[in-house]
Image (tube, coloured by chain):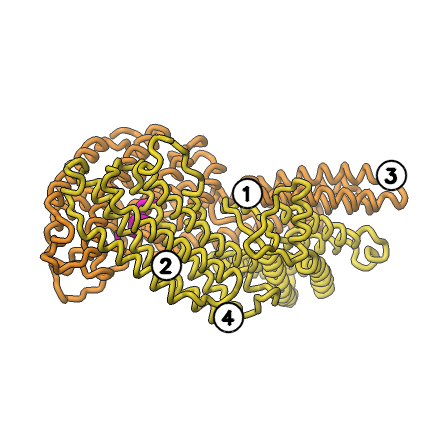
Chain colours: A orange, B yellow
Amino acid sequence: MVPVNSLGSTVVPIHDEEEGSSIAKKKPSPLSFLSSLLQKIGVEDPRKVVHCIKVGFALVLVSLLYLLQPLYDKFGDNAMWAIMTVVVVFEFSAGATLSKGLNRGMGTILGGGLGCLSALLARSVGGNGKAIAIAISVFIFGMAATYFRLVPSVKKKFEYGIVIFILTFNLVAVSGFRGEEIIKLAKDRLLTITIGFSISLFTSLLIFPVWAGDELHRSLKSKFDNVASSIEECLKEYFKLIDVEKTGTQSSGDLDRYKSVLHSKSSDESLANFARWEPWHGRFGFSYPWNKYLHVGEFLRELAASMIQLKACLPSHRQSPQCIRSTIKEPCEAMAVLICSALKELGDTIFNMRKCQRRESIVAELKMARQELNSTISTWKLGTLGNQTSSIRDELSMASFVFMLMEMVDKVEMLAKEVQELGELAGFISQ
Amino acid sequence: MVPVNSLGSTVVPIHDEEEGSSIAKKKPSPLSFLSSLLQKIGVEDPRKVVHCIKVGFALVLVSLLYLLQPLYDKFGDNAMWAIMTVVVVFEFSAGATLSKGLNRGMGTILGGGLGCLSALLARSVGGNGKAIAIAISVFIFGMAATYFRLVPSVKKKFEYGIVIFILTFNLVAVSGFRGEEIIKLAKDRLLTITIGFSISLFTSLLIFPVWAGDELHRSLKSKFDNVASSIEECLKEYFKLIDVEKTGTQSSGDLDRYKSVLHSKSSDESLANFARWEPWHGRFGFSYPWNKYLHVGEFLRELAASMIQLKACLPSHRQSPQCIRSTIKEPCEAMAVLICSALKELGDTIFNMRKCQRRESIVAELKMARQELNSTISTWKLGTLGNQTSSIRDELSMASFVFMLMEMVDKVEMLAKEVQELGELAGFISQ
């Protein structure tokens, strides 16, 4: 059941429900060991189960603030804020947990500080003016913070922090109005929030951590594989009728694997966003070039978009005559094989974090294949190709098919350059 | 500054920062009146300012629970939950506010109920077993709820509800352990949460409401316009060198307007998700076919993906000889004009919610244009087109360009069918 890759090490396939793709993870981490154990007893996605157990564990830990008398004596009902922090801050990946926790911390400190200030100022007004001063400050700060919340670039990284800012500011300002000891109140809440955050952090980062960076790293590799499989399958479909006429074999789902790549932009961006918060782990340092991952992803999405057009040329769409198609079968297939192997090689390069030594030979091979294809089709004459048996549109479709393949070669060449740059930025080792 | 549309009514352009597109909104609603007022004094996006004012207003309203003595006597510190609800639940659109509020309500009721039950059961155990029983229930419920939270389909609609469920369950269960009157506690909190929700709902739905449904409706129209503009601009670019050689005019940003369509899937889905929660407003009823909007959007995204390939054929990419291009200039331009006008007409049809009367004539016109293009290019012979001045690749590029246009015609035909179906489902009026 557990596949073994070409290097002989065990890999654990992890099903990513969001993108519908199947990605492979290398062995060494303790999480993968637990994962394979869970898989053996039939659990489909072990990482999720592990995450759930971790959340349950963190919740029990934080509940001890209520359940153990000495702790309750110290914190009292403020322990509530610790529970709240764990529930809200604990996310699937370590980066997301860190990002939310730090947002919560910053929002609380800023909101609490300004709330105290407002309350003290309002107190100095005194009388009925006090309530009015509080109301005005609540209105102005609430409005201003909400405006920031709507700015897209701020929203992406700090939305949660701003929500917590508004909340804390309001609570502290109005509690201050009530004459409670706001400094002590703010201090206690901050302390319990810190406890909650520490418990989340401890559980998320130290017990079988799931890194957003790892996730992005793997998903980039799986994008390469998905696009390559789609191209392979598309070529197979295109020339199928020639080889196995009327066998009517259903095309496998591989043909549509490019679709998961097509809509990966937003999930990539949020993963990169979280990955930036993550501390040094494995071979990912603090200044790891996650942005370059997004660039490479963009190229892969363009390739995936080309797949839509390549698919449009499939015989099932237009009944292009086989006799003509057979003339381009060999050079096209040779080209597709090169494209796919180049894609897979580039994906592996990134996944294994090794410098791509073969970039120049890849480019040279692709150039040669293109020339071969060029010379084959230079003998075509539109309108006469199929002895008048084919419509002009069928021929345009074929020309498009070839053109698209050539365009893909260009893109793969650019991709090879990008991957090389990534290797330099990220310090891939040369093997 | 304020543009006037063909019907003579004032439209308020609203800049959608998220998608980088400019969309127009018809007049009648009070929001647009306020919007145009705000725009006159130089506010770029009036809706956002209105939203911020609404949030500030709601915060002041809910703060009255603290600020007014009689209200504080009744609710005490539980008023905190009302403030929390307003801060967290109040979102930009009415649908999002409703969805979050109902999620919060359901999560609280369910979590509170089960929390009470767990606390009571634990009490019946007594002794040291009590704490252990609470800890076990916290662990099990936290784990199970987190697992549900990770299921993609549940996550989309109910993630926030589940977070609130875990939170409330934990708080109630551990408070119950402390021997507090948990039934009263749960009741008070539910009451204050209801107050907070009511204030949010009142402010969000009754004061210049922003409907997610309206947003989706407008964004669909703007998608049609964006794709049409891109196609127009691409054709202009393609044949530009023929008309205005060496004038070197920079291409306008219109060429790239398709990009905002390309990545609109997730924002469309969340808008549709919120729109479903929204009550009857304007001409959008409860069972309005928002799903069909997503289908139409999918077609438009495919068209936008075709644009990537169409753009790849631009002369700036490959120096295809003008003398050949000029042979297809007229039929291609005629076809593009038809495609663009069809797209704009379909977009208007949806925007104005009127039945598309011209579907058949649109389809007939497109067919005719395609035949004309067919007959023009049937005289081509690859490899001989440009008296050997052009490489085979340039010719393939031209063939692809024509093929892509023809493919677009197919897609527009299907789109016309989809729009007709939408009109039937949504009860568009025939004019």
In percent of the image, x 20 and y 49: which residue is there?
Answer: A399
Q: Looking at numbered disc 1 in the image, what kind of residue is underneath it?
A: Pro
Q: Are marks 3 and 2 in contact (CB under 8 Å)?
A: no
Same chain under badges 4 and 3? The reply is no
Label number found at residue B430: 4
Q: Position of residue B121 (x, y in %)?
A: 62, 67
The disc placed on residue B412 is 2
State the residue at coordinates (43%, 67%): B420
Q: Same chain for marks 4 and 2?
A: yes
Q: CA distance from mark 4 to mark 3?
A: 64 Å
> How far apart, in angstroms, are the residues tagged by discs 3 and 2?
67 Å
What stretch of residues is rendered in magenta? A300-310
In x, y percent, where is residue A265? 42, 46
Q: Quadrant of the C terminus of chain A?
A: top left
Q: Which residue is mark 3?
A: A125
Mark 1 vs mark 4: give the one in front.
4
Separation of marks 1 and 3 at Cα, in angstroms? 38 Å
Name the residue beneath numbered marker 1.
A152
